[in-house]
């Protein structure tokens, strides 16, 4: 399946909103389970978004740093996990 222009624009807006939240840590919508679910909703495949979000959240569960280290980018990873799975027709 292909991502349309409207879907791509909505995903870009969603990436900016969740990326800003990752910087501010205000609502914690930058976690992969939420990012992937909303991205799956935008693409029209909510089940794929939830499954990809759960798997990505498990991968990042132990990577929350303590101290002055830079955490990995969960927003980009969450969005691209769903987009790549959706584009390659990986059905849950």
Image (tube, rainbow, N blue to C red):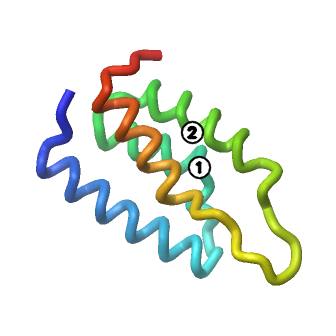
Q: Which of the image's four quarters has the N terminus?
A: top left
Q: Is residue 42 above or below residue 23?
A: above
Q: Which residue is mark 1?
A: 32
- Relative placement, left or right, of 7 versus 46 is left
Q: Position of residue 54 (x, y in %)?
A: 63, 35
Q: Secondary structure at mark 1?
A: helix
Q: Position of residue 8 (x, y in %)?
A: 22, 52
Query: Which mark is on residue 53?
Result: 2
- Relative placement, left or right, of 1 versus 55 is left
Q: Is residue 24 above or below residue 16?
A: below
- Relative placement, left or right, of 9 versus 46 is left
Residue at x 55% of width, y 48% of height: 34
Q: Secondary structure at mark 2?
A: helix
**Label total for image:** 2
Residue at x 43% of width, y 49% of height: 79
Q: CA distance from mark 1 to mark 2?
A: 5 Å
Query: Which mark is on residue 42?
Result: none
- Relative placement, left or right, of 77 versus 5 is right
Q: Residue furthest left?
A: 5
Q: Position of residue 33 (x, y in %)?
A: 60, 44
Residue at x 46% of width, y 34% of height: 49
In the image shown, does 76 or 14 lie closer to the viewer? Answer: 76
Counting residues from the start of the chain, the first of labels 1 and 2 encountered is 1
Discs 1, 2 touching: Cβ within 8 Å: yes
Q: Is residue 68 above or below residue 46?
A: below
Q: Position of residue 11 (x, y in %)?
A: 31, 55
In the image shown, does 40 or 70 lie closer to the viewer? Answer: 70
Dot 1 crowding, Cα within 10 Å, few <14, some 14–19, many 20+: many
Report which quarter residue 72 is drawn in: bottom right
Residue at x 58% of width, y 63% of height: 73
């Amino acid at each position: 399946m292909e991502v349309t222009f409207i879907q791509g624009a909505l995903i870009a807006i969603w990436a900016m909103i969740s990326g800003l939240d990752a910087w501010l840590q205000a609502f914690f919508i930058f976690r992969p389970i939420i990012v992937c679910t909303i991205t799956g909703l935008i693409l029209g495949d909510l089940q794929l978004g939830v499954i990809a979000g759960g798997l990505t959240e498990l991968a990042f569960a132990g990577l929350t740093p303590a101290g002055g280290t830079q955490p990995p980018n969960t927003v980009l990873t969450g969005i691209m996990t769903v987009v790549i799975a959706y584009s390659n027709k990986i059905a849950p």
